[in-house]
Amino acid sequence: MRLQPQTEHPHGLSDTNYDSLFTKDKHIIFGFHGYPWLVHRLTYRRTNRNLHVRGYVEEGTITTAFDIRVQNKLDRFHLIQDVVDRLPQLGSKGHT
């Protein structure tokens, strides 16, 4: 509930505190062990719209914890790939 504004929840962050943590203009890669839409719903009124959430994608499979992270692109490789793809100073050098 901390992601919500103070006006929405008593434990929410003020806009100033949220922006000091997540910035107003930089890309945010958010690895969330839940449904990505939840993070989007909690942050939809915030200034920074460059939020990229990786989370659980329902596929009805039963597998290992590692496989779930890879299938949902939540493993370190995919998260770093997201970061590299969004670093403007790399241009096409970081593109896969």
Image (tube, rainbow, N blue to C red):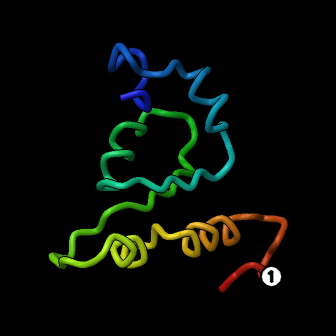
Residue furthest bottom in the image: 96
Of 85 and 81, nearer the camera is: 81
Residue 75 x %, y %? 50, 70
Q: Quadrant of residue 83?
A: bottom right
Residue lying furthest left: 60
**Residue at the image position 77 percent from the left and 81 percent from the top:** 92
Is 90 placed left or right of 84 in the picture? right
Under mark 1, the amino acid is Lys
Residue 11 image-quadrant placement: top left
Seen in the picture, residue 90 relative to 15 is either above or below; the reply is below
Residue 35 in the image: state x and y as whole percent: 29, 55
Task: State whether residue 54 is above or below residue 47.
Answer: below
Q: Quadrant of the N terminus?
A: top left
**Secondary structure beneath label 1:** helix
Residue 69 x/y as whole percent: 40, 70
- The quarter in which the C terminus is drawn is bottom right
Q: Residue at x 43, y 32 (%)?
A: 3
Residue at point 80%, 75% (across, down): 91
Disc count in the image?
Answer: 1
- Per the image, the residue denoted by label 1 is 93
Q: Quadrant of residue 79?
A: bottom right
Q: Residues within 10 Å of mark 1 (few under 14, many from 20)?
A: few
Residue drawn at x 44%, y 62% as measured from the top left: 54
